[in-house]
Image: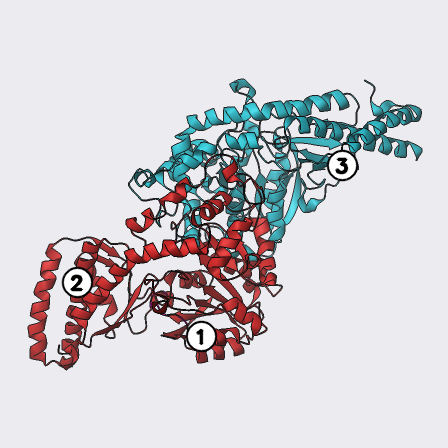
Chain colours: A red, B cyan
Amino acid sequence: MKAYTEMTRQELHIERERVASRFEEAKNQNLSLDMSRGKPCREQLELSNGLMDALHGNDSMLDETGTDCRNYGILGGIPEAKRLMGEMSEVQPEDMLIFGNSTLNVIFDNVSRSMTHGVMGCDPWCRQESLKFLCPVPGYDRHFRISEYFGIEMINVPMSETGPDMDMVEEYVNNDPAVKGIWCVPKYSNPQGYTYSEETVLRFAHLQPAADDFRIYWDNAYSIHHLYHEKEKQDYLPEILAECAKAGRPDIVYKFISTSKVSFPGSGLAAVAASAANLADIKRHMRVQTIGHDKLNQLRHVRYFHNIDGMHAHMAKMADILRPKFELVLDTLDRELGGRGIGDWTKPRGGYFISFDSLPGCAKSIVATCAEAGVKLTPAGATYPYGIDPNDTNIRIAPSFPETEELRAAAEIFAISVKLVSINKLLHQSKK
Amino acid sequence: MKAYTEMTRQELHIERERVASRFEEAKNQNLSLDMSRGKPCREQLELSNGLMDALHGNDSMLDETGTDCRNYGILGGIPEAKRLMGEMSEVQPEDMLIFGNSTLNVIFDNVSRSMTHGVMGCDPWCRQESLKFLCPVPGYDRHFRISEYFGIEMINVPMSETGPDMDMVEEYVNNDPAVKGIWCVPKYSNPQGYTYSEETVLRFAHLQPAADDFRIYWDNAYSIHHLYHEKEKQDYLPEILAECAKAGRPDIVYKFISTSKVSFPGSGLAAVAASAANLADIKRHMRVQTIGHDKLNQLRHVRYFHNIDGMHAHMAKMADILRPKFELVLDTLDRELGGRGIGDWTKPRGGYFISFDSLPGCAKSIVATCAEAGVKLTPAGATYPYGIDPNDTNIRIAPSFPETEELRAAAEIFAISVKLVSINKLLHQSKK
């Protein structure tokens, strides 16, 4: 397989004709496929249908202490939900607060609270002059949107297979008191599927923040979301709360976790794990904001999953649905683009995304070309703060939602689009 | 029945002995009764058990447009939920946004958003020098706590049977640009059970706020929560959004509504009705905060209640449980305290509370005396901003939660406590 980057102009022209005719063929299929968001497919959702039948009759709606979950009360979550989510989060039940249906909402509220009331007694952010968040890139667009919405300056920090560039993180966090946070998806990261190395986690735990109100936003969204059953094919992430405590700074991290991609997105449980001091700070706010979150949904989840073993068994079934989809996309990329020198992509062992990096300046054009052929991708740039990918290379691929045959078509159209745009780019360059 | 206020010291002493011995008797029963919060009782909760069985199998989880409610998406609520809550709120579906399980949370978030981002393009409240909210008193403690938490100055506005003192409201709202809001529970108000008169509603609609970012916080928590089936025994409240639109100021009101006391507190639906401009303002924020609220719970409610007729039928059953409890308390108060001149109380036709006003300076002492005999009441002062009832007279009675026999005992203990404290007060006064 000859790399496009080593082809002559003539060879490229011949190749372009071949690719262009395949693209026309694809376009004529009038497809409408969506690989834009990390949405579970119908088959995955069906795995959790039993949740809807978990509560019947009066007694089934009492928690283990006898509290009627149909009524008001219980601010931080029922005990068995704290236990379940604690197991999922690898912390003790007392280190947890259970919230509503969305960690995004909890994270947003955390930033909002920091703006209006400050972090654990520090000045409210809205009264501080300069606010910055570090943003490992590429990263999760919805995180970046929260900091952008609150007018927090975002600073790109490059990601690698071991996590964010920790030299840069330490440099910023330990010296600049305006740096208040860093967005982390530490396991099977969005979009690359990277898991922070042990060294990275330890360096996080040993940060010496210049700002007392600096917090690591540790969004462990894919903690048990493996693609493979075999332990040795699963990523491992050290538990951050324990490491921070050991390092003598128990308060520098909030850990977020949810069942959005375990049970039902939008109807799952969200939770926060943090130090006692942080939880007390959060509860002061929460107590004014609500009487309590949906306890019946908490109970429903406990009745259905029982414990972390139940969750793991459930996630193994999820893996059996997702793994072939990831492999199909990766095989297509290998077959079509392997050795062509026009793109790199990640090979995650869990999570929801594959990250693709094109030749510089091609990502937007590839996404647009795909759209022309009926394949919707996450907008190029979305994985960067302000939607600006400085090199215009990164594309997030979400293989979960389409059915297999659709996914096969979509992956092929993606690869063809990459080829077409890259050839044009190379021809254009060599002209100059 | 001779009024205590007209008794001689000697008569009062004799009466005190009689009352004190009844109090000792009550105390010796070692009761533990709770009339502190407006919590539905078990029997009421059981009326909604069918909700838990409303969703079965794949197809039952699609909304009427075919959207799978188990998956991500649909920021403002599924169409049929907007229709149901729109009917409940007497507005069109397009005037609604559906939220999570709690209007308190929605109201809090509204204030929080106003603090950090301002109201419809106005300066964020956190950058404005002076912020005030008008607080009809007695009122809902959780409203007051929100304004207190955000450092908003609270101004007491006296309530009467027709609503807040509108001369005072107009004076403040139309002249002071620091006045940003007013807390209203316009129907079966908390705690008095008063419903704003048509004139009051119209005067609200015709306010000419000095501040562009002034909003009426219209918390219609008890919109369909009648105690009586007969239309002529139900209160009527004009629809505020329509009135504001007619008056040419469609944007000055947010209307909040929930099923917390229709289905399950903590597991119901909350909603906002407002002008298109206000809803757009709210959605700008919401879009960053969440991907969407629990659509399965929305669907569950629609499947269970179908429409407003289903809700009314359901609420009629609620009334049959609540009405005897209200009547029991009112009968006890009449029998024990009628004509004694030591207290006044409201006789609501809906809602969750009875409001009691003691002789000046007696409320705290009455609540403490009740507690001594095992009856927990809402803390005196709670119905006023900062927990300070200037005359120390108001006590909120919540008859819903206790079972009938408990309630009978609790109401009697309450009446005895009122007598005891009042006699002591009168004796103390007459000594001076």
Q: Residues within 10 Å of mark 1 (few under 14, many from 20)?
A: some
As rendered, which of A384 and A270 lies closer to the eye? Answer: A270
Q: Nearer the viewer, mark 3 or mark 1?
A: 1
Q: CA distance from mark 3 to mark 1?
A: 61 Å
* Magenta stretch encompasses residue A193: yes
- Please name the amino acid that badge 3 sits on: Ala
Q: Is A6 on the left or on the right of A119, as rendered?
A: left
Tell me residue B424's x, y (percent).
86, 33
- Please name the amino acid that badge 2 sits on: Glu
Residue A211 visible (yes or no): no
Per the rendered image, the range of residues in magenta is: A190-198
Q: Residues within 10 Å of mark 3 (few under 14, many from 20)?
A: many
Q: Nearer the viewer, mark 2 or mark 3?
A: 2
Number of residue marks: 3
Mark 2 sits on what residue? A412
Q: Is B56 on the left or on the right of A294, as rendered?
A: left
Q: Is B368 on the left or on the right of B300, as rendered?
A: right
Residue contact at pointers 3 and 1, CB within 8 angstroms: no
As rendered, which of B334 and B432 lies closer to the eye? Answer: B334
Main secondary structure found in the magenta portion: loop
Mark 1 sits on what residue? A198
Residue at the spot 52% in from the left edge and 28% down from the top edge = B237
Mark 3 sits on what residue? B363
Q: CA distance from mark 1 to mark 2?
A: 36 Å
* Magenta stretch encompasses residue A110: no
Q: CA distance from mark 2 to mark 3?
A: 76 Å
Q: Quadrant of the C terminus of chain A?
A: bottom left
